[in-house]
Amino acid sequence: MGQHLSIDETALSKGELYTIITNKKAKGKKGAIVAILAGTKVEPIIEQLLKIPKGKRNKVKEITLDMANYMKMIARKCFPKAI
């Protein structure tokens, strides 16, 4: 998964929103995508990310995200040791 992640949302052509979590070290190559989750609602995203073993999630040191409050909530809940 990597120690440095990014969380962002994207909209497809029909306005469908997705939350995308990527491993920054992979730089778009193999292993770059950690998760692509439909929507931006906090609870379902957290539910899915908590399925990743806690040991792996605790190894994340840094998360880059925009100022959207829902992203901060996801980062705090799922990656508690990251800044």
Image (cartoon, rainbow, N blue to C red):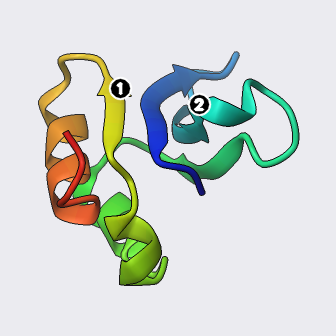
In this image, 40 relative to 13: left or right?
Answer: left
- Under circle 2, the secondary element is helix
Q: Residue at x 32, y 24 (%)?
A: 65
Give the residue type at disc 2: Lys
Confirm or deny contact between disc 2 and disc 1 (CB under 8 A): yes
Residue 32 in the image, given as x and y percentages of width and height: 72, 40
Q: Residue at x 49, y 77 (%)?
A: 52
In this image, 71 relative to 18: left or right?
Answer: left
Q: Name which quarter of the figure residue 23 lies in.
A: top right
Task: Give the residue number, with chain letter if any, for mark 2.
Answer: 24
Q: How many other residues sit within 10 Å of disc 2, few (<14), some (14-19) or many (≥20)?
A: many
Give the residue type at disc 1: Thr
Task: Give the residue number, with chain letter if any, for mark 1.
Answer: 64
Sequence-first disc among 2 and 1: 2
- Under circle 1, the secondary element is strand
In this image, 62 relative to 72: left or right?
Answer: right
In this image, 59 relative to 19: left or right?
Answer: left
Q: Residue at x 36, y 81 (%)?
A: 54
